[in-house]
Image (cartoon, rainbow, N blue to C red):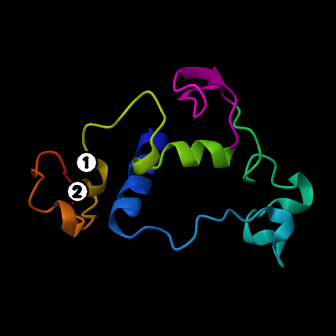
Amino acid sequence: PIHPTLERLLHLKLHSEPFKTTYWLHADESNSSRYTCLYYDSTNCVGHNPGDLTWWPTVHKSKKTGTYEYGMLSNQELRGMTHPLAYRLPYVYNHFRWDHCVDQDIHFPIPSQYRDDITEEDFVGW
């Protein structure tokens, strides 16, 4: 499945070397609309922009009430909820295993702040 792999890779990035900015460029803001979407001319990149709603409802923790709610979120809201320091989704990953990457001899560096606290079993592929 691609979703858990991409989300875990995003977490690795955030733990290792966070983005300098989390600004999400809207296709209309780019000098070249193809910067964010190859199909801008025919689709306006619907579904790829920060304010576009995901096509599935999500269980998430409300900032206002602190309880879990079920509803539609924008891409940007969902990305924000997956940040390890502000996590608001009802699940967590118990490992960072990428066996399919190891099978291709692709390995990811272990973030220095975690090298003393992790086991090789939990971080296969690092």
Q: Amino acid at mark 2?
A: Gly
In the rendered structure, are the residues bearing label 2 and label 1 in contact, judged by CB atoms less than 8 Å apart?
A: yes
Q: Amino acid at mark 1?
A: Asp
- Residue at 87% over, 55% down: 44
Q: Position of residue 51 (x, y in %)?
A: 76, 48
Q: Quadrant of residue 42?
A: bottom right
Q: Secondary structure at mark 2?
A: loop
Q: Which residues are magenta?
A: 56-74
Position of the N terminus, as image quadrant, is top left
Point out which mark residue 125 bears.
2
Marks 2/1: CA distance? 6 Å
Q: Is residue 80 above or below residue 31?
A: above
Residue behind mark 1: 99
Q: Position of residue 109 (x, y in %)?
A: 24, 68
Q: Position of residue 34 (x, y in %)?
A: 79, 70
- Residue at 40% over, 48% down: 84
